[in-house]
Amino acid sequence: MATSSVGPTLVLGGARSGKSSFAEKRVETFGLPMHYLATGRAFDQEMRERIVLHQAARQGKGWTTHEEPLELVGLLRRINDPGRAVLIDCLTLWVTNLMMEERDMDAEFAALAAFLPEARSRLVFVSNEVGLGIVPDNRMARDFRDHSGRLHQIVAEKSAEVYFVAAGLPLKMKG
């Protein structure tokens, strides 16, 4: 199977760091049809409002949106085309969804890791860096932090570029 000449990009940052905006602008520079793969689920009004704001920011810019909270790799395989750019926002919401559904994290992460070298689309992953704070006081939060950290390492290793965004400023870490 043919692979893209450019590997994935990973964009990490904290909440409201500007990582999604940076990633969207990055994808817009590729000059390819743009696909937005949203992993978030709206369980409450505040999350519904966040989703609406993200959608409004992309309105009229030519994005095709795909909403997929669980089957990330399956959707990436279905839209895998060298003539597309795909922004995945975000990996930590995907981790949350997988945990809530009690999915096999190792198997899900392994499937994504196996797919990345086959990817023909230009992929840009967005994720929240959650490992910079204090150790959480409960097991579920520690598991979430640990799963996210492991996933970030997997994606970063296979990425051509990695950025860390803070206060709207990107720091290139790899590539």
Image (spheres, grey):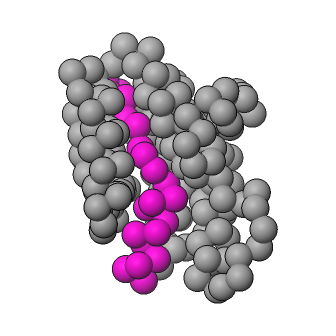
Q: Quadrant of residue 7?
A: top right
Percent of width and height locating residue 57: 33, 30
Query: Where is the N terminus found, in terms of image quarters?
Result: top left
Front one among 172 and 48: 48
User: Is any part of residue 118 visible from this angle?
Assistant: no
Percent of width and height locating residue 48: 28, 55
Residue visible at 49% across and 54% down in the picture: 91
Front one among 21 and 97: 21
In the shown orientation, is residue 8 left or right of residue 64?
right
Residue visible at 41% across and 78% down in the picture: 100
In the shown orientation, is residue 114 left or right of residue 1?
right
Front one among 134 and 30: 134
In the shown orientation, is residue 12 left or right of residue 115?
right
Percent of width and height locating residue 112: 48, 56
Q: Is residue 175 magenta?
A: no
Eyeballing the image, is 107 above or below 71? Answer: below
Percent of width and height locating residue 142: 67, 77
Query: Where is the C terminus found, in terms of image quarters?
Result: top right
Q: Quadrant of residue 80?
A: top left
Eyeballing the image, is 155 above or below 105? Answer: above
Which range is magenta?
75-102
User: Is any part of residue 106 visible from this angle?
Assistant: yes
Residue visible at 71% across and 28% down in the picture: 172
Front one among 78 and 23: 23
